[in-house]
């Protein structure tokens, strides 16, 4: 079985499009995948057991050595780095720009560092082209503005209904400015989205790969606890990636007006049991979810999937942003027409200055920037609930916790 796993892990290792190098504490290359060998122009297996310095230009080797010593000295504190921009050198001595992310790990009391490497050559060339196009466009705008001003002066001198013409040209100019502004905002949004997807997928995949590699090392029966730990890491990160994909699909459907709702009559306990089951797999040590009412007393006609999505999102956030050994309470009540859900936690809360932006797409509060997340979950939940005639709100105090309120019609047909 372990032999099969080893073959599978080697296939996965070589299938990853980014370059991956594993080095020991002496900066000797322990392993390099096919993407790395192709990136640096080496034949298969030629990098193994070589010094890392063969991939680094000579003028950077001293600086890199000092940085490596600093990084490895902090490995016990699990220091990770990402977004380091350096230069690599190919076998043919050609230099090229790269971006690396470093992750430390220890196997059998030996320290290693895994480097995730991306060739930045194409991106750098693209950025230069964009800058060049930007300069040309700015020159054209300046030239157009000068010509417009000359035309306006001529119209004034000729007294050819210049006031009406000026007004028309100003309106056209404003429309052009508005169009350019919207195009810039769209480009910024696309850039932010691509960066978000790249980061949010790369980090969990790196964790999955590391855990998969380490699983191969724990082959003894008494090491089952360590195997379980890494299997749980893989499961959690796969669930996290699946949730991100679901959010992106839901977001695309909302934006393109393709979202359609399916209304059925169901018992609330069915949804609550599913939400709690899914949430229990994500709980931290000592965390517990309390359901304060008998949910089987409530029957409603609604979109079951949307209600589950909303509760999952809010409870997942409570788990993610709350410390160990804390409780998360779900309280349910109703009035004449609506069901009311209150989810309470004792987590890090939302800073007061950020609260007015919390439902904005891609927004993340300043106290969670170092925690994984996309910033689109609550935006999606709010849009769905409002489409179904519901509402969502919250109260929060930083470092004390949050209360989220969801109100949804019991019968969508009423």
Image: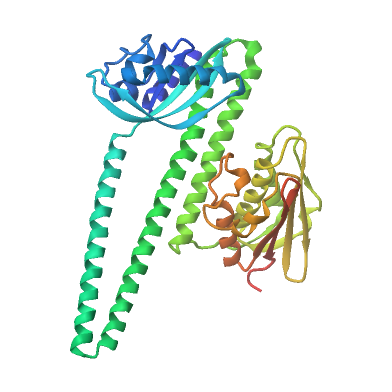
Eyeballing the image, is 235 above or below 351?
Answer: above
In depth, the one of 303 and 378 nearer the eye is: 378
- Looking at the picture, how far across and down is residue 296, in whole percent? 77, 54
Q: Residue at x 57, y 32 (%)?
A: 235
Q: Is residue 17 visible?
A: no
**How many marks can you see?**
0
Eyeballing the image, is 101 above or below 177?
Answer: above
Residue 234 quadrant: top right
In depth, the one of 71 and 296 nearer the eye is: 71
Quarter of the image with the C terminus is bottom right
64 displayed left or right of 111:
left
259 displayed left or right of 381:
left
Q: Residue at x 47, y 39 (%)?
A: 199
Q: Residue furthest front?
A: 157
Eyeballing the image, is 176 above or below 152?
Answer: above
Q: Residue at x 33, y 19 (%)?
A: 59
In depth, the one of 174 and 318 nearer the eye is: 174
219 displayed left or right of 319:
left
Residue 252 quadrant: bottom left
- Looking at the picture, how far across and down is residue 139, in whole percent? 23, 59
148 displayed left or right of 48:
left
């Amino acid at each position: 079985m372990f032999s099969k796993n080893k073959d599978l892990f080697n296939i996965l290792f070589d299938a990853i499009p980014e370059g991956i190098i594993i080095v020991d504490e002496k900066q000797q290359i322990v392993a390099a995948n096919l993407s790395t060998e192709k990136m640096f122009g080496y034949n298969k297996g030629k990098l193994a057991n070589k010094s890392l310095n063969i991939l680094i230009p000579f003028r950077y080797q001293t600086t890199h050595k000092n940085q490596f010593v600093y990084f490895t000295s902090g490995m016990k504190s699990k220091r990770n780095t990402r977004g380091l921009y350096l230069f690599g050198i190919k076998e043919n001595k050609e230099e090229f720009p790269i971006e690396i992310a470093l992750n430390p790990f220890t196997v059998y009391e030996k320290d290693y560092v895994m480097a995730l490497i991306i060739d930045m050559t194409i991106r750098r060339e693209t950025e230069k082209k964009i800058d060049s196009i930007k300069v040309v466009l700015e020159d054209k705008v300046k030239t157009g503005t000068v010509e417009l001003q000359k035309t306006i002066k001529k119209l004034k001198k000729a007294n050819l209904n210049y006031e009406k013409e000026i007004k028309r040209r100003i309106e056209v100019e404003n429309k052009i400015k508005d169009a350019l502004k919207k195009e810039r905002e769209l480009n910024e949004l696309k850039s932010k989205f691509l960066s978000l997807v790249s980061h949010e997928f790369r980090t969990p995949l790196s964790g999955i790969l590391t855990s998969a590699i380490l699983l191969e090392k724990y082959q003894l029966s008494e090491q089952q606890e360590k195997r379980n730990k890494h299997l749980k890491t893989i499961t959690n990160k796969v669930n996290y990636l699946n949730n991100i994909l679901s959010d992106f699909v839901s977001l695309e459907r909302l934006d393109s007006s393709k979202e359609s709702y399916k209304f059925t009559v169901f018992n609330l306990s069915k949804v609550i049991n599913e939400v709690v089951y899914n949430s229990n797999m994500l709980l931290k040590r000592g965390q517990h979810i309390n359901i304060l009412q008998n949910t089987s007393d409530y029957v409603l006609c609604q979109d079951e999937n949307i209600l589950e999505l909303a509760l999952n999102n809010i409870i997942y956030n409570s788990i993610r942003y709350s410390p160990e050994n804390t409780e998360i309470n779900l309280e349910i009540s109703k009035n004449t027409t609506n069901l009311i859900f209150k989810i309470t936690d004792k987590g890090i809360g939302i800073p007061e200055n950020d609260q007015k932006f919390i439902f904005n797409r891609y927004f993340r509060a300043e106290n969670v920037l170092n925690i994984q997340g996309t910033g689109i979950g609550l935006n999606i939940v709010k849009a769905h609930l409002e489409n179904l005639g519901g509402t969502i709100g919250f109260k929060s105090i930083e470092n004390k916790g949050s209360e989220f309120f969801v109100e949804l019609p019991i019968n969508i047909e009423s």
